[in-house]
Amino acid sequence: MNFEFPLESIPEFISEFFTLLTETYMLTMAQNREQVYQDFLEQESGFNAQKLAFLDKGIKTSPYHTAVSDYPNRLTQRPTLALAGAKTYPNVGEVPEIDEQALHFLHPDIKQACVCVGGSAGGPLKARWLGRNALDKEQFWSATKIIPILNLLSQLKTDVQSSEVRGEEKSFSLWQLFEDVVTYEEKIGSSNAIAAMFKCFQTYQGLEEWMMNVTGNHHAEFQGLYGEEPLIASPKVCQGNREILSAAPETKKRETQPGENLVTAYDLTRLMSMVGWHFHLPHEAQFSIEWENLKPFIVALGKDISRYLDVAIAKLGITENLQSPVILSKMGFGYSNSRKRTELTYTCFTQFSYKGMPMSVAMTLRGARALGNFDREAVEIDARMATEVTEILRRLVSEELK
């Protein structure tokens, strides 16, 4: 038998061989989580609580920043990862069964977590829900800013892309406001003030009930703002000369906010998974939001200032075998005076094709560190979050996260 190998193919073959060898090596090395953590901690040199290596990395540094506008199109690709024993994705208002033992591998500094792996080998989308204290009601800081935006979108039945928010002789594009909440670039205003303004389109009780009716979890609390007054106290959504939506008949001020924003890791994972899989879910499991109106928010979530998934992908060395990646996320961060510790939260959805197999996962993690030193706590929990996101992603691509 004669075997001919074209000489012109040798460079390509060698390149592919070394890519595979490098990826295999890096995936193997990533199993040493303590070393991964130390590597990320080294990258925190020169950073502090005011600016962290990964939390504040920014979309402009991301290797995926030019692809963000294509994320809605990429999300029309159906994840085909087969999940043995997984149940059909739940309808709106139904709480799925969450395996509270499945995330035992996470570091103790991750206090609450919920991971949802989804896929379908044909038929309805199926999902496995994994948790660590996933139904604990806690403060998730700015990660909860996705909630008033999704509620607003559910109220709008006209084109979001051409809509504006007006009031107090101000006028801003709705999609640009979404982006300012997520990027923290303050092109229009602060993320906190804009998010508080979005809460003005519902009463506190109405927004809380809407969230609970979507997730099915009825012991959350969503009664606070975000440390600042709303950007516009009585905003309205307009399209041309037509007013589409006005503010709810309830004044929103910091001094009169009736409670706190206390939700669960499950709540945020459920909402992010509904965003990422919206195109594939049946009507009974979807937001009451038109796909076209969800697209601008998907693009905004693609520009999150925190880039934990970016560094996880790089750390695992899987970039070359990753096609059509989508990364949607929202971070939260702060120091709790009552708990005397620094806390960091991260809710995200990612989808990509790895070695030809479309995969997707939604996750929410809440980490905390108490050392009596704000700056040290901050850099350590930032490195820890990057480490644990890397481990979850490693288990996903290695098909261990099932």
Image (cartoon, rainbow, N blue to C red):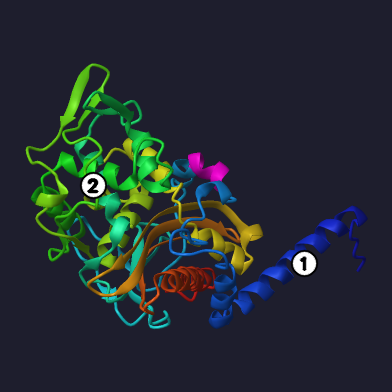
Q: Could you tell me if residue 189 is visible in this image?
A: yes
Front-most of residues 99 and 331 = 331
Q: Say above or below: 244 vs 313.
A: above
* Residue drawn at (66%, 58%) of the image: 320
> Residue 148 bears which disc, if any?
2
Q: Residue furthest left?
A: 249
Q: From the top left corner, tell me how far across and down residue 380 is, in percent.
A: 46, 73
* Number of callouts: 2
| Disc 1 secondary structure class | helix
The amino acid at mark 2 is Pro
Residue 344 included in the magenta stretch of the image: no
The amino acid at mark 1 is Phe
The Cα–Cα distance between marks 1 and 2, rounded to whole angstroms, is 47 Å
| Disc 2 secondary structure class | helix
Q: Quadrant of residue 185?
A: top left
Residue 69 included in the magenta stretch of the image: yes
Front-most of residues 239 and 262 = 262
Q: Main secondary structure of the magenta part?
A: helix
Q: Specify the segment rendered in magenta.
A: 64-70
Q: From the top left corner, tell me how far across and down residue 256 is, in percent.
A: 9, 50
Q: From the top left corner, tell me how far across and down residue 4 is, in percent.
A: 91, 61
Q: Which residue position holds label 1?
A: 18
* Residue drawn at (53%, 71%) of the image: 394
Q: Could you tell me if residue 114 is visible in this image?
A: no
* Residue drawn at (29%, 51%) of the image: 145
| Lateral position of residue 167 relative to residue 209, left or right | right
Instruction: Locate the N terminus by quadrant.
Output: bottom right
Q: Residue furthest front?
A: 373
